[in-house]
Image (cartoon, rainbow, N blue to C red):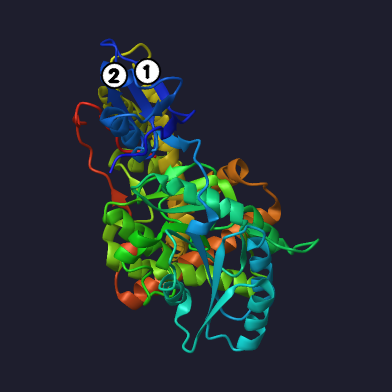
Amino acid sequence: MMLPDGFTVRVRDDVRLLPTPDGGLSLVGGSPLRSMRLASTAADRVAGRQVQVHDATSDLIARRLLDGNLADPAGLTPADPAELTVIVPAHDRPELLDRCLAALSGLDGLDVIVVDDASHDPGAVAEVVRRHGATLLALTDNLGPAGARNAGLARVATTYVAFVDSDVAAAPEMLAKLAGHLADPRVALVGPLVRGHRDKARPAWFERHDMAASSLSLGTRACSVRPGAAVGWLPSACLVARTSTLREVGGFAGDLRVGEDVDLVWRLVEAGHVVRYAPDLEALHEVRGTVRGWLGRKLVYGTGGAELGRRHGEAIAPAVLSPAMAAAAAAILAGRWWSTPAALASLAWGSRVVSQALPDVPGRRSLALRLAVRGLGWSLRQESALLLRHWWPLTLVACLLSRTARRMVLAALLVDTAVAFHETDVRPTTLLGRRLDDLAYGAGLWLGAARSRSVQCLTPRLLRQHRPTPEKKFEKEVQPWQ
């Protein structure tokens, strides 16, 4: 299926465009990092950092740019509200449901189905639904969020379907814009940036942390979503999908009470569909109102890792590292006399590998070095997260026995603090919140691993280095870093 005639993609600002001696063009960037080489005839289709689809060649170029996260769709037209049905799974909490349905009102032609997942007080839920003019589907058995969404999906007669949790406020105009991404016939699912929100004047400290650094907020970088990319999953708090495609893959996994959103995204990707993240559009997720509820939810999220590992293998890996950069990052965290020479040697090796995959243009070596430094920084970040989040029970034992382990944890804390400064409004409560978040989620991971008797969700994936090879005369990839 070709992209629609006139469909436009724009090369991302952080992607480098390097002219090649033969009149072609090399693009360096994306996620995972790659170098895509375009022959002169293909390079002519890139005008002002944009490619507009008019034939098979421009369609192929646009698809490869999108798939490599080198470009994003541009100028999309919102879908007709009459083509969209919104499914809201609900289980009690009528005050949040009221806020959710109020946000969805005001757009003519939009159908809203509330699926009451066997609430303890179904009358209160029914009253809220009636007041907002939505359709009520009441279940007699509690199926969980995945099962409730599937029950609503069975009632959908429109081309597109949106899923909005009852604790989320999503404007209908925003959902229509999300559905505009489905103009690409390969795209099956798209999600917005989900921000933490608390509807009161003075949120508690943990609420402020979740508003600033919610685990559902996946950053501001638009992305083609898949394992190993900058965005590897989407939260089911707010999603828009192509109805027919979702039914083809069986909808959400009804037997999962946690991780069903990750599972759906990965099944769609494995089936050859495209999933997109559109952070220029936002939905607001009400954060938990108690410390116990907040940390308890983080622990539950962690327990889902083992089952996802069983179903999807190494896609659940908590880190993806090249052996050389993994060793260099570990050496830096260890803080020993040999750390600097080891890091420099790894940078030199990594720079040489990247340089071999880049086009022969002026400044190739300096660019390769910058990319190698970027790879080392990404490895440092991932290994710090392993020590502080995914492996913290093991890290704690190691700290009791080893001075080197204690140095590595201190260095990891410094790296994580630097990340916090870069990504959030850092306050003492932010740093405390990060540590508690890590402890709760990591505990959940280990609990799930113990129950399933599998460490798949705790095992990093090491990338094998390979020589880049041409693909259909258009592309070469530079692996392996974000």
Residue 50: image location, x then y, percent: 43, 26
Front residue of 290/412: it is: 290
Residue 252: image location, x then y, percent: 38, 69
Quadrant location of the N terminus?
top left
Residue 435: image location, x then y, percent: 58, 59
At horizontal 57% and vertical 48% (from top left) the residue drawn is 281
At horizontal 56% and vertical 61% (from top left) the residue drawn is 110
Q: Is residue 410 visible?
A: no
Front residue of 207/176: it is: 176
**Mark sitting on residue 18:** 1
Q: Is residue 335 above or below residue 165?
A: above
Q: Secondary structure at mark 1?
A: strand
Three-letter amino acid code at disc 2? Answer: Pro
Residue indicated by mark 2: 359
Local packing at callout 1 (Cα closer than 10 Å; few below 14, some 14-19, many 20+) is many
Front residue of 152/148: it is: 152
Quadrant location of the C terminus?
top left
Residue 209 left/right relative to 478: right
At horizontal 38% and vertical 75% (from top left) the residue drawn is 254
Mark 1 near mark 2, Cβ–Cβ under 8 Å?
Answer: yes
Q: Secondary structure at mark 2?
A: loop
